[in-house]
Amino acid sequence: MMSTSSARPARRAELLAAGAATVTVVLWASAFVSIRSAGAEYSPGALALGRLLVGALVLGGICLVRREGLPPRAAWPGIAISGLLWFGFYSVVLNWGEQQVDAGTAALVVNIGPILMALLAARVLGDPMPPRLLAGMAVSFAGAVTVGLSMSGGGGSSLLGVVLCLLAAIGYAGGAVAQKPALGHASALQVTTFGCLVGAVLCLPFAGQLIGDLADASLSATLNMVYLGVFSLALAFTTWAYALARTTASRMGATTYAVPALVVLMSWLTLGEVPGLLTLAGGALCLAGVAVSRSRARAARVVAGVPQPEQTRESA
């Protein structure tokens, strides 16, 4: 009876973390569509700054209402590094890269990030690399390659675009790993808010471009920028940080392999681009790999009928 009651809070925490990760993945997938749309009328730096300013306003308002205050000093190194690499650098080079390559190629290259994240987290944070995680990452990466190859046959790729998306993947991996220690000292909302502020400050040199683009951009492009700030940044990065605080960076990175599959689906529904069989097969592989990477062997879940705290935490 005691083992059953003690398992319920752990199971609830696991479900909440999985739900938060799902929200993040869906909103990040939608960002690929919005970036391509807004990027037709906003320069990469201006779009990054506008998105970050909107996100900072939303997150700052929530922090004031909740009276979160400043993060502890110990959290600032991770916040500063994630703000520099992920919120700032990643935003600019991804926006630029998506002006050079099609969505499939961008999703493929950026999704090298989870592999880099897993390797970096194992090296820096000592994250475990269980066989199921490695197998799931391999399956998902094969799916991402399939999606990219199936969608990049129109000649829209360029060497510059691929290099920019690769740089974005490196910034994403480094920023995400840097966030993990900060979440041990500050809340997910604090880490996200102040990381966003760091990124916005770094992008201030693009303020002149943003003012000029705002004057000329259509309402649709500006609304896409606002959407990127409110949902795919403020909300999605907060749910990411919440889930990351309750699992390993490697496992969270593997979860984002579902993004290319969702990009295909969203492009189909919003842009009328009907995916081919190869694209659908690649999307199915992405999702299957995520399922494998987040699964656990029965023996790891229960030892003598009692859930193990460390194992439960890793799989949340």
Image (tube, helix red, strand yellow):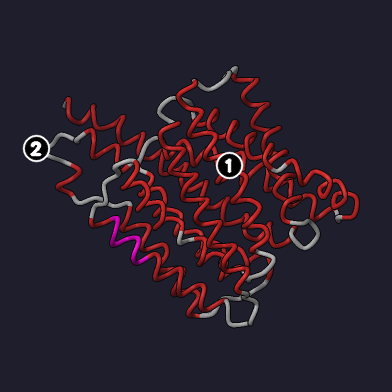
Q: How many marks?
A: 2
Magenta segment boundaries in residue numbering: 133-139
**Amino acid type of the residue tagged 1 in the rendering:** Leu
Q: Residue at x 54, y 52 (%)?
A: 26
194 on left or right of 114: right
Query: How busy is the neighbourhood of tag 1: few (under 14 within 10 Å), some, or many (20 plus)?
Result: many
Q: Residue furthest left?
A: 304
Give the alpha-carbon distance from disc 2 to disc 1, as whole Å. Answer: 46 Å
Main SS category, magenta section:
helix
Residue 9: x and y in percent read: 31, 29
Q: Which residue is mark 1?
A: 84
Quadrant where the C terminus is found in the figure: top left
Q: Earlier in the sequence, mark 2 or mark 1?
A: 1
Query: How busy is the neighbourhood of tag 2: few (under 14 within 10 Å), some, or many (20 plus)?
Result: few
**Amino acid type of the residue tagged 2 in the rendering:** Ala
Q: Residue furthest right?
A: 215
Residues marked 2 and 1 touching at CB (< 8 Å) = no
Choose between 256 and 82: the one closer to the eye. Answer: 82
Q: Residue at x 60, y 17 (%)?
A: 67
Number of the label disc, if any, that sits on residue 271: none
Q: Residue at x 33, y 51 (%)?
A: 294
Residue 84: x and y in percent read: 58, 42
Residue 227: x and y in percent read: 70, 47
Secondary structure state at the residue bearing disc 1: helix
Q: Is residue 265 magenta?
A: no
Q: Which residue is mark 2?
A: 304
Choose between 230 and 184: the one closer to the eye. Answer: 184
Where on the picture, by quarter, is residue 181? top left
Residue 300: x and y in percent read: 18, 45
Q: Is residue 261 above or below residue 251?
A: below
Quadrant where the N terminus is found in the figure: top left
